[in-house]
Image (cartoon, helix red, strand yellow):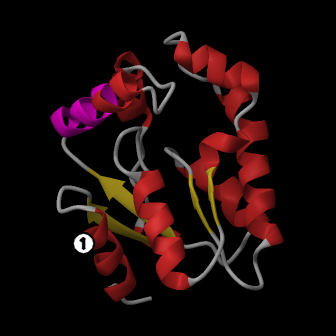
Amino acid sequence: MGVSGVGKTTVGELLAQRLGVPHRDGDDLHSAEAKQKMAAGVPLTDDDRWPWLERVGAWLAEHATGGAVTGCSALRRPYRDVLRAAAPGVRFLYLSAPPELLRERMEHRLEEGRHFMPTDLLASQLATLEPPAPDEDAVEVEATGGPEAAVDAFLAAPR
């Protein structure tokens, strides 16, 4: 979990590979309308997010027995509550990074045509972000040391 540009997809794919479980990018579960809205620089509302979060939670629930990894912003506790309700054993890897690095990564992705999220929405995501509380079974990892280091830190964290 974390804001756009923090490395959720890259770290998630690597984590899933290491664990030998399926990976699905949460962005794949956004509606076409939500993707168009974000691409136009319009922040999503909670009404846009609830159905998406339910789809992400349902995908996690489908894989509860064997495990799975998904990247999902899950910026606020109520959003994470939806995921926990659907998949009670979920553990969050909260990736954080300085805003300057996030903006640089987002610009790079846009230039390469790899993502729809414009850098204009970074400020709204950072304003919305509520870091996980101690009772949320989350591990915070600064995503400045590369994907391998982030996965290593997560896997080494006590449960």
Tell me what residue is drawn at x 33 percent, y 65 percent.
Answer: 140
In-image side of 46 versus 127 (left or right): right
Tell me what residue is drawn at x 35 percent, y 21 percent.
Answer: 119
The reply to whether residue 58 is in sight is yes
The image quadrant of residue 142 is bottom left
The image quadrant of residue 80 is bottom right
Number of numbered discs: 1
In the depicted structure, whether residue 96 falls above or below residue 159: above
Residue 69 rendering spot, x and y as whole percentages = 59, 67
Dot 1 falls on a residue whose secondary structure is: helix
The reply to whether residue 1 is in sight is no
In the depicted structure, whether residue 84 falls above or below residue 73: below
In-image side of 92 versus 121 (left or right): right
Please rate how many residues cluster around mark 1, counting C-alpha atoms within 10 Å: few if below 14, some from 14 to 19, many from 20. some
Where is the C terminus found, in terms of image quarters? Answer: bottom left
User: Residue flagged by tag 1: what amino acid is it?
Assistant: Ala
Pointer 1 residue: 149
In-image side of 118 versus 55 (left or right): left
Q: Residue reaching furthest front?
A: 112
Q: Is residue 32 found inside the magenta-colored segment of the image?
A: no
Tell me what residue is drawn at x 66 percent, y 78 percent.
Answer: 89
In the depicted structure, whether residue 8 falls above or below residue 104: below
Q: Main secondary structure of the magenta part?
A: helix
Residue 137 rendering spot, x and y as whole percentages = 49, 74
Q: Which residues are magenta?
A: 99-107
The image quadrant of residue 148 is bottom left
Of the pair 83 and 135, the residue shown nearer to us: 83
In-image side of 103 versus 1 (left or right): left
Residue 31 rendering spot, x and y as whole percentages = 75, 30
Tell me what residue is drawn at x 67 percent, y 79 percent.
Answer: 67
